[in-house]
Image (cartoon, rainbow, N blue to C red):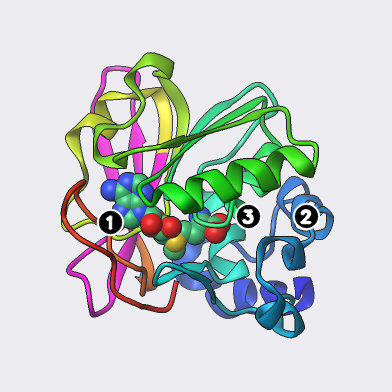
Amino acid sequence: MVAEIEATYAATRAQTGFAAMSAPVRAAMLRVERHRFVGAREQPFAYRNQPLPIGHGQTISQPFIVALSTDLVAPEPHHVVLEIGTGSGYQAAVLAEIVHQVYTIELVEPLAREAAARLAALGYRNVEVRAGDGYAGWPEKAPFDAIVVTAAAAAVPQALVEQLKPGGRMVIPVGAPGGLQRLVLLTKAADGTIARRDVLPVRFVPMVPAGGGGGTRERN
Ligand SMILES: C[S@@+](CC[C@H](N)C(=O)[O-])C[C@H]1O[C@@H](n2cnc3c(N)ncnc32)[C@H](O)[C@@H]1O
């Protein structure tokens, strides 16, 4: 799986600016056992570089996208990171291998419960999972050094921009559900100005407003 991710990094280098995974991200991708985050039926495919179903019409993202999203926010050991869209808990675990603390929000309550139990059983003491609507972020724990959004929003939620520290980075798929979106990197300058870079086309499940119904089945 890691070799396939490296090959995809090389193939997308011109768009992403990354020729290879950073050493901490590579180490985290090697350490976190993806088969622990999927059900029995998906076990044989756990180490393929592809998204897989996790129930409730949702998916565990493609490992390349997990690695790239992590690299894009330039995680450091002292960082506090917010993730929107816990899903299986896999992206949260990869982040937790590198940073001090991860807060993660999942709209689908059973997924939030399962991910919290899984992460605790795997020994992650630095991940807190909350069931709720990611559009509001987690103001009590803000500001964050980085925010990783793993569901596609039509536009960047303002609450998340506000909860990013000066110097912080946010990665988020932006675009209409059902088609391709852009994986966007936002960087907040010391004066609060936001710089935006469109990184590459992606296909994520939609970020659903609370009370907005279930997600549709898509690739990431
Ligand atoms: C592609 S999956 C996430 C994969 C996950 N990061 C992982 O590692 O398994 C997107 C997740 O976002 C969740 N989601 C959708 N809308 C949301 C919202 N408004 N707030 C929080 N989570 C949301 C979905 O329920 C789904 O579990």
Does the segment drawn in magenta span residue 180?
yes
The residue indicated by pointer 2 is 32
Tell me if 76 is positioned left or right of 51 in this view: right
Identify which residue is drawn at 22% across, 30% down: 159
The residue indicated by pointer 3 is 90
Could you give the CA–CA distance between mark 1 and mark 3, rounded to whole angstroms? 18 Å
Q: What element carries label 1?
A: loop
Q: Which of 63 and 169 is in front in this view?
A: 63
Q: Where is residue 132 in the image (x, y as percent from the top left)?
A: 34, 38
Which range of residues does the magenta coloring cover?
Answer: 170-198
Tell me which amino acid carries mark 2: Val
Q: Position of residue 216 (x, y in %)?
A: 29, 74
The earlier-in-sequence mark between 1 and 2 is 2
- Residue 193 seen by the camera: yes
Tell me which amino acid carries mark 3: Tyr
Identify which residue is drawn at 61% across, 71% down: 9
Instruction: Please tell me in which quarter of the rendered image ligand 1 is found.
Output: bottom left
